[in-house]
Amino acid sequence: MDLVSLVERIGEAPTAALFGLLTGLTFGIAAQRSRFCLRAATVEFARGRMEDKVSVWLLTFSTAVVWVQAAQLLGLMESADARMMAVPGSWSGAVVGGLIFGTGMVLARGCSGRLLVLAATGNLRSVVSGLIFAVVAQMSLSGILSPFRDRIASLWITDGGRNMDLLATIGLPSYSGLIIGVLIAILALILSRRNEIGAYRLIFASGVGFAVAMGWVLTYSLSQVAFDPVQIESATFTGPSAHTLMFFLDRNAILEFDVGLVPGVFIGALVAAAWAKELKLQAFDDTITMRKAMIGAALMGFGGMLAGGCAIGAGVTGGSIFVGTAWAALFFMWVGAMVTDYLVDQRAGALAT
């Protein structure tokens, strides 16, 4: 069945949700088996190590860049039409939001995407943190926190009514993105070999990046045949978590890519964990851990919405099409996470001894 026939049979909105579900399933399975996590990578890097967590993150990121840039060169998608590229970006939001999000993911012991994957395996800490994250994200999108978010985001906006395309701004040729992705992938593989990471884990780490490319290509393909405007998007968890929450709370909510993505990730991670016999109920270790996780989740909800995306949405999805503010947000997420790890975990541990 071709795409036009599918849209005619089930409709545009259900097709978008189906594509979100397929993207989410791929992401959930790959992320659970590879143990992909930006928080873990930043903490490892902050402590002067370049081991398995950094290697996995770099491989995921580079794979997303390679697949997405290759798809663009083949005409399977057009990054200029992606929503995060076609609308003005906020430099102030990327800086402040990135720092807040990075702080929050260290306190919560996982970024929003990682919390969703862990929740599927029975981690009750991640369930609670994920719900808080989704509620605060919705409050930041259209609730009581939205004026504060808008005020910060409006301080410094990209010029020209669009976000910045880093490759075009620097004046690099269209194929340069693919070359950059390949170079990062080579670095990731060198580190993986040095750290003796098995092929099995590397394949699934690459699968996370492939899921990002999959989302871009599917939504772009749908936009080419749909009668109504369709957002060209891919994996991200700040906005989608809020939208999915409201879908189940508002009877008038409509199906969209986001509503398929979040359940898809949960189901994919659940299936992968069950297959590997890793399903296990886990609670908070103590009240201090619970308090830090709840505060961290709230910070991620606001910071992710302010930054224009979470560690996945800005860090990998936006990064794969070289959105200027996405790269800025990713950089400051690393900075926020590293500083927080030093102040909260490393320094506190040193004082305790």
Image: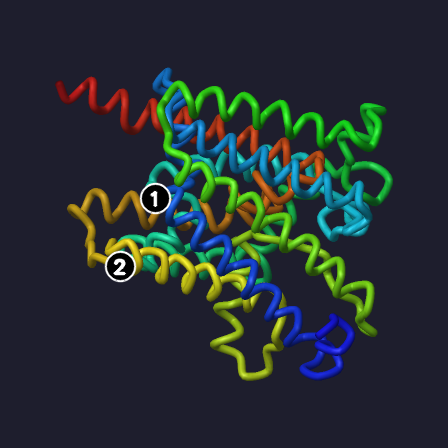
Q: Could you say whether the residue bearing mark 1 is in a helix, strand or loop?
A: loop
Q: Which quadrant would residue 307 be assigned to in this image?
A: top right
Q: Residue 157: x, y in percent?
A: 75, 39
Mark 2 touches mark 1? (CB < 8 Å): no
Q: Residue 316: x, y in percent?
A: 58, 40
Q: Residue 212: x, y in percent?
A: 60, 49
Camera-side residue of 10 and 325: 10
What residue is pinned by disc 2?
122
Q: Is residue 14 left or right of residue 251?
A: right
Distance from disc 2 to disc 1, alpha carbons, whole Å, reads 16 Å
Q: Is residue 7 above or below residue 91?
A: below
Camera-side residue of 84 and 227: 227
**In the displayed image of the protein, which residue is found farthest to the top?**
48
Q: Is residue 19 left or right of residue 177?
A: left
Residue under the image location 77 percent in, 51 percent down:
76
Q: Could you say whether the residue bearing mark 2 is in a helix, strand or loop?
A: loop
Mark yes or no: residue 179 visible: yes
Q: Residue 149: x, y in percent?
A: 59, 48
Which amino acid type is marked by label 2?
Answer: Gly
Res 108 label: 1
Camera-side residue of 66 and 336: 66
Residue under the image location 56 percent in, 51 percent down:
211
Q: Is residue 269 above or below residue 296?
A: below
* Quadrant position of the C terminus in the picture: top left
Residue under the image location 62 percent in, 46 percent down:
308
Disc 1 residue crowd, few under 14, some 14–19, many 20+, Cα 10 Å = many
Which amino acid type is marked by label 1?
Answer: Ala
Q: Which quadrant would residue 164 be assigned to in this image?
A: top right
**In the displayed image of the protein, which residue is found farthest to the left?**
353
Q: Is residue 36 left or right of residue 261?
A: left
